[in-house]
Amino acid sequence: MTTRHVARWDLDKTYLRTEFDTVKDLVKTAFERPDEKRTNPGASTLCREMVNAGVSLHILSGSPEQMRRRLEEKLRLDGIRWDSFVLKPNLQNVLRLRFRAIKDQLGYKLPALLEARTRRLPPELAHAHETLFGDDAEADAFVYALYADLLAGKVGPDVLCAVCESSKMYADVLEETLSNARRIEPEPVVERILIHLERQSAPEDFAPLGRRVVPFYNYLQAAFVVHEDARVSAEGVLRVASEMVLAHRFDGDQLARSYVELARRGHLRGVRAEALAEAFEAWASRPQASAIAPLREMVTRLPAAAKAARERYVPPPEDEPVPDYLKLVKAHNPRRRRR
């Protein structure tokens, strides 16, 4: 039996089009009704299609626990089914006078990820591989990469302790983090780290974190990646592409260029493109089929694009160096860099 897969999704700026740069933004976000919250184009469709393909969905968000009811209702409106949903205990942080923790991502997400992996996964997911979704507005890429290398046994307790202390992690949180890290049975389980370029960061900014990190501009690009990894069906990719056409005015050229741009950066292996063409034939034969002309242009151009991707793609070396996390931790938060 094939081991099930785990997808971990952030919400703000990854799944949802959230604004929180000002106090006004925060207040508006807090009082938005579930039906007023906007989803990033293609995100809900890709999320649904991965769940339909048997992927176990786990949500880890920096939104405060007090927003749980509205966020859960929003996800239900989008037709999303999840297996766990963790939100940040900001009220608890305030009551304990832990004001640094309100904005700190490393001190929240890394312990939460390790807790989820080592203590909360059901037995059937004990050895499941993972795909992680985040964005460039906070520290997601850094935290996810560190988490991945901890699970793979490439980062030891001394480095972990030094990184957490450099980030001014609270002592009890550090102790819990180290305790969970010691429970890890080393295994390279993180397949892919997908980072939504919400702030239009330069993709090369993420190069120090390794080839596993894939910055993407739109969710069709993310769909191409997880389709190559066999975590979503070919029809699922077409559904994402159809949404980009119908709701966001992509044409066939933009759909195809989404593939080409990602392949140019070396993130696509150029495999399984024929499955998309086969799925399109079934798609186009349906009476109520949508976006047929743009999708046909995309799949017509994919064979040449996939061939170019295969020629360009270079597999990551088995001995790919581990990022210098102690050096990178000082700049892992984009807000801190701007200040």
Image (cartoon, rainbow, N blue to C red):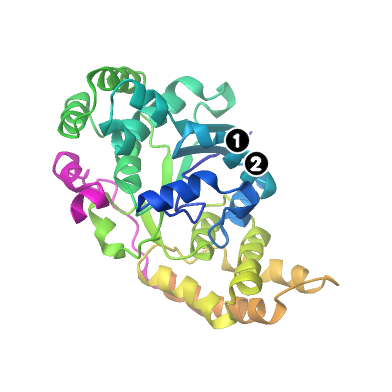
Mark on residue 73? 2
Q: Is residue 82 magenta?
A: no
The picture places residue 53, in percent across and down from the top left corner, at: 65, 47
Q: Residues within 10 Å of mark 1 (few under 14, many from 20)?
A: few
Where is residue 331 drawn, in percent x and y? 18, 48
Amino acid residing under circle 2: Glu
Viewer-closest of 139 and 184: 139
150 relative position to 88: left or right: left
Q: Which mark is residue 253?
A: none
Spot the residue most to the right: 287
Closer-to-camera residue (150/31): 31
Residue at 25% across, 60% down: 205
Report if the CB atoms under discs 2 and 1 are less than 8 Å apart: yes
Can the viewer see residue 185 in this picture? no
Say if the magenta span includes residue 332: yes
Q: Residue at x 46, y 44 (%)?
A: 10
Q: Which residue is mark 1?
A: 69
Secondary structure at badge 1 equals helix
Q: Secondary structure at mark 2?
A: helix
| Amino acid on which the number 1 mark rests in the picture | Arg
Which of the 4 quarters of the picture holds residue 312?
bottom left
Q: Is residue 50 left or right of residue 146?
A: right
Relative height, residue 115 to residue 142 (above, below): above
User: Taking 179 as reference, is 146 above or below it?
Assistant: below
Categorize mark 2 by other alpha carbons within 10 Å: few (<14), some (14-19), many (20+): some
- Give 73 or 199, whichever is nearer the viewer: 73
Quadrant placement of the N terminus: top right
Q: Residue at x 46, y 27 (%)?
A: 116
Q: Distance between the Cα atoms at labels 2 and 1? A: 6 Å
Magenta segment: 311-339
Location of residue 21 in the rendering, given as x and y in whole percent from the top left corner: 35, 53
